[in-house]
Image: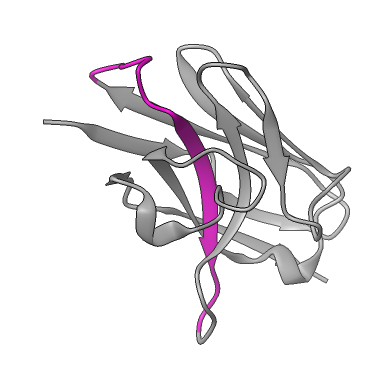
Amino acid sequence: QVQLVESGGGSVQAGGSLRLSCAASPDTPRWNCMAWFRQAPGKEREGVAAISSGTGHTYYAESVEGRFTISRDNTLHLQMNSLKPEDSAMYYCAANGPCGLGTWSRHGQYTYWGQGTQVTVAS
């Protein structure tokens, strides 16, 4: 049974940094796309960033472009710099979704999800 476990969330001041990690068990490189999503209270779940397992191509939401970096070794990571209060949300790791410019952020098409890790950015 596939499990995704996130870590690295926490509270930080605006302008600070956090690094999220997502460990997959079992690790399966055949997954097409792995991604980070976030959901703030009362808001829709939104795609933050994704990475193609095959090509390594990355995709970012416009709101985080230039501040966040997604990467993958044996673990999926999200380096978040210059954090803003509006980045506060529950962050979820997702796997086996459709990588592509117009498709990576469709949360309904991802097969596996983690439980989430909370990120809070104070102003």
**What color scheme is it?**
one colour
Vertical relation: 96 (above or below) 54? below
Does residue 40 belong to the magenta stretch? yes
Residue 56 place in picture, x, y as percent: 63, 19
Residue 66 place in picture, x, y as percent: 89, 43
Q: Which residues are magenta?
A: 26-41
Q: What residue is drawn where x is 55% and y is 47%?
A: 104
Q: How many marks?
A: 0
Camera-nearest residue between 92 and 119: 92
Vertical relation: 80 (above or below) 69? below
Does residue 22 belong to the magenta stretch? no
- The answer to whether 22 appears left or right of 18 in the picture is left
- The answer to whether 11 appears left or right of 94 in the picture is right
Residue 30 place in picture, x, y as percent: 35, 17
Q: Identify the residue at the far left of this view.
A: 1
Quadrant into which the N terminus falls: top left
Residue 43 place in picture, x, y as percent: 54, 82
Camera-nearest residue between 38 and 50: 50
Q: What residue is drawn where x is 32% and y is 52%?
A: 115
- The answer to whether 47 appears left or right of 1 in the picture is right
Q: Identify the residue at the far bottom of this view.
A: 42
Camera-nearest residue between 117 and 55: 55
Quadrant into which the C terminus falls: bottom right
Vertical relation: 108 (above or below) 4? below
Q: What residue is drawn where x is 77% and y is 69%?
A: 85
